[in-house]
Amino acid sequence: MDDLAAVILAAGRGTRMRSSLPKVLHTVCGKPMVSHVVDAVRAVHSGRLVVVASPESDALRQCAGDSAEFVVQAQPRGTADALLQAENLLRDRAAQVMVLCGDTPLILSSSLSRLLERHQATGATVTLLTSDSVPPEGLGRIVRDGSGRVVDVVEDADAGERESAIAEVNAGVYLFRAEWLWPALRELSPSATGEYYLTNLIKMASGAGLGVESVGSEGALEILGVNTRVQLAQAEQAMRQRILTNWMLAGVTIVDPATTYIEAEVTVGQDTTVYPNTTLAGRTRVGERCALGPGSMIYDSVIGDGCKIIASMLEGAHLDASVEVGPFSHLRPGTVIEEEVHIGNYAEVKNSRVGRGTKMGHFSYVGDADVGHDVNIGAGAITCNFDGVNKNRTVIGDNAFIGSDTMLVAPVRVGARSSTGAGSVVTRDVPPDSLVVGAPARAVRKKRAPEQTE
């Protein structure tokens, strides 16, 4: 619909959350609630999007994206007053206005699409989304006349015995004809608390004989508004189940969904298996045919095809194909692991590149280093990268052999095909094809270079 604008109401203080963080910025599956709503809108509408925010809205602006426009509701005077703040931006610039709440992270774009279709097909003045699949307590009841037409929305606090028995409730998602909307908002009377509510527009439109249409929501708990930490946990659980179901239908094996956590921005390739007690979070990208877990925690990392990560933590790491990690290892930010590397148990890598085919079996630390291909790093070997002031780099050449308990005191270089004896403390550069031992390490002999044949 080319003449459409969308407005997300996100100015609520969320006092029941008991938090210094604005309510709509609390996360559901790793993404702020309002970002879920923005994504649902953007799936059906690429045009104007206005977010109504409170005066403390700097963090909210970052979440909503560069394409959104912002207006401020200076005082919390209800949903109708919040929408009215967008009038100057949208009057005479949009013929239809979609309105949503920023605290409904489970809203589906498919429901918004059906709402648009119904509104356009009927030419209604107001079309609203309703639901009968959530507990009605605290929500406005949908009142219909004898022919089934929506005539009113009665808030829970104002509902009598008859209205309280109604199972169909208001979702807080509307489509309005703009030329009627803006004058109608100014005609509303305040409630007993001094606030102005959008729900009163339904009775106003119906009473004037204007078209009021409705569409039922699709998913269970789709319209859940998050006002408390309890509801936040409900939304988290529902969203997590939705994410897991989508990945299983896309060809990912999730052995135990009850103990698997995959956040909203994660992607997973086909034929990957995720074992119990595994978390995939942030902007993690997982390739095909991987095995993750059990007990792995992977944040903001890229994992190539055919990798195996057992009971280990990855943070900001990049793994090429066919890498093995764990159990009980830690790859920290800035780590790049090339193809066919084996990192065993109790190993740590930070801000380093580890070359193809290298083996780092156990109890080792590599930090701020460039490790060549086919290097062997023995048990207990470490790079001493911090001198108390600066982080210094270690360079290990191709086919080097780093003996057990070797300490490489950076900045230092170990040449290609060189070896260090067990317990060596390497404080000076080691030339290629050398063997060094001792503390401090000294060269004992030059290794014979491999014979060249033609």
Image (spheres, grey):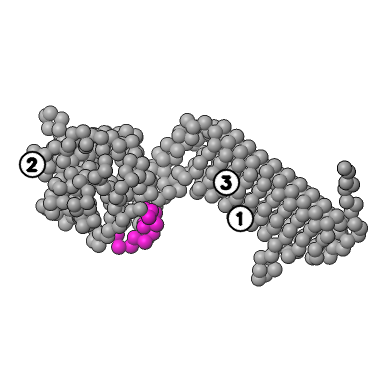
Give percent across and percent down for residue 140.
Answer: 21, 42
Give the number of the disc on residue 334: 1
- Secondary structure of the residue carrying tag 3 is strand
The front one of 262 and 182 is: 182
Residue furthest to the top: 147
Q: CA distance from mark 3 to mark 1?
A: 11 Å
- Secondary structure of the residue carrying tag 1 is loop
Q: Which residue type does callout 2 highlight? A: Ala
Span colored in magenta: 54-66
- Secondary structure of the residue carrying tag 2 is loop
For residue 157, say whether it is visible.
no
Residue furthest to the front: 454
State the residue at coordinates (58%, 36%): 288
For residue 184, say whether it is visible.
yes
Q: CA distance from mark 1 to mark 2?
A: 64 Å
Q: Are marks 3 and 2 in contact (CB under 8 Å)?
A: no
Snapshot quadrant of residue 155: top left
Q: Quadrant of the C terminus?
A: top right
Name the residue that disc number 3 marks. Answer: 302
Q: Quadrant of the N terminus?
A: top left
Give the mark nearer the N terminus: 1 vs 2. Answer: 2
Snapshot quadrant of residue 243: top left
Give the number of the disc on residue 185: none
Q: Which residue type does callout 1 highlight? A: Gly
Snapshot quadrant of residue 234: top left
Name the residue that disc number 2 marks. Answer: 208
Q: CA distance from mark 3 to mark 2?
A: 58 Å
State the residue at coordinates (14%, 37%): 211
State the residue at coordinates (70%, 42%): 340
Count all numbered tags in the image, as a single digit. 3
State the residue at coordinates (88%, 46%): 452
Give percent across and percent down for residue 131.
Answer: 27, 35
